[in-house]
Amino acid sequence: MKIGPLNIPIKEDFSLKSILDFERTPINMLLAVSVLAMLAMLLLGVGNYLIHSHHAYNVTREHPWGLMIAVYIFFVVSSTGFCIVGSLGDVFGFKDFTMISKRAIFGSIVTIMAGFTVIAFEIGHPVTMLIYNVLTPGLTSAIWWMGTLYGLYLTFMIIEFYFLLNNDMKKAKIFGLTGLLVGLAAHSNLGSVFGFLNARTISQGVYYPTYFILTAFITGIFLSFIVMGFRYKLNFDDKTKKLLEGLAKIQGLLISILIFFMTWKLLTDMYGGMPNRAEVAHHIIHSTPFYAEVILAMIIPLLVILKDFGKSPVLMFWASLSGMVGIFFMRYNLVHDTQVKPLQMMKTNEYQLPPEWIEYFPSATEIMISLGGLGLCIALYYVGTKAFDLDESH
């Protein structure tokens, strides 16, 4: 190891040549080409946005939140999930989980940076936002608290990662615990952005602030299987198998709780036929993306876990890939289903026809920026694995 700027330990062989030096297997080549394509899409999408502004997106006054909001939520949920998994070892002292701490904390940093990149081209004026976020704080705004808390969270995660790299576990534990508490506050606050929507009764209430924390932990475990699968090329040693088996058992419990939560949420939404809520719930359970979410993120991973209670890490790797696709649909459904019922402000019998369901499909620019965020996340993580020693230090 060599010491870089600010006393950061960096691998001796880290260079541009080391970044380009990877095993030329078909799957690695496919990943490399895919990441480069997604980064090119990011540049094209941002360029089109800078030329046409929000006219490049398919969002409307009736459906103001689109794909990029869903992708932002996808990334920050992933970041919080990584943070929770990383905290199991270095904060709470579970020895079996210390081997993933650095990798998970670094993952939390790159995923939230990807989320910030995507949302920067959705909010319109990110520089102005940063200035007035400090000069005129909106203390009664859930979105103001979300941005502020996530900014603090990222700061604490970077500091914790710095101390982990330097094997200063005492300070890493302090900043890790602080970052975890701030991250959980930020994430439950993100859920409150939906819970405070009194005009959207399908979302309004206390469900989403707690649901977001639960699904963050689930997402973090899915991602842990994926990053460890690539790290060990699905050839796990006994210590890694023990770690993954423990995570799989936790995941089985969490997915079971999630199914329980979602079942009662939908039943209470439909019960009694409450206007603007029951019909939305019925619309949700008749939509294809809802079943993609349920099957890919819940049913398949849970069946794999129940097969042998987490003793098949290779199967769990593939189930986790399925789970992350389902998690994306979960975030997209959350945003779209909240807005699918039009807000009716006039007397329909006298002035206009009854409104129909609001349809939305992302524009090419939204898709390119969103995929570009994924490409940026993978690229940053890959460079990090080349620059830093993310394995457990002895």
Image (cartoon, grey):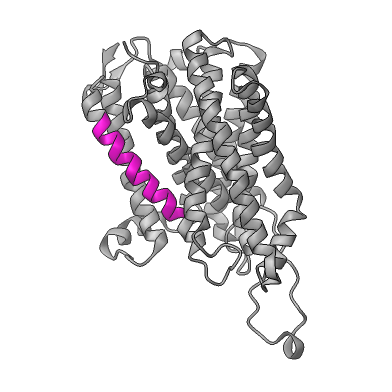
- Please state the total of marks drawn on the protein image: 0
Q: Is residue 75 above or below residue 351?
A: above
Is 67 drawn above or below residue 368 in the view shown?
A: below
The x, y position of residue 303, in whole percent, is 69, 30
Residue 179: image location, x then y, percent: 32, 40
Instruction: Name the foreground residue: 145 vs 64.
Output: 145
Q: Residue 337: which quarter of the image?
A: bottom right
Q: Residue at x 31, y 10 (%)?
A: 394
Q: Is residue 58 visible?
A: no
- Spot occupied by residue 378 in the image (x, y as percentages of width and height): 52, 29
**Foreground: 253 or 28?**
253
Left or right of 155 on screen, residue 246: right
Q: Is residue 112 shown left or right of residue 60?
A: left
Between residue 124 and residue 195, name the one nearer to us. Answer: 195
Residue at (37, 21) in percent of width and height:
98
Q: Give the quarter of the figure containing the N terminus.
A: top left
Is residue 380 found left or right of 168 in the rendered image?
A: right
User: Would residue 175 be counted in the magenta stretch?
Assistant: yes
Q: Which corner quadrant of the image does residue 82 belong to? A: top left
| Residue 271 appears in the rendering | yes
Residue plotted at (51% across, 26% down): 247
Q: Where is residue 161 in the image (x, y as percent from the top left)?
A: 32, 28
Q: What residue is at 34 percent from the left and 13 percent from the top? A: 11
> Which of the 4 image quarters holds residue 335?
bottom right
The answer to whether 348 appears left or right of 14 in the picture is right
Magenta stretch encompasses residue 29: no
Magenta region: 173-190
Question: Please, what is the dominant secondary structure of the magenta stretch?
Answer: helix
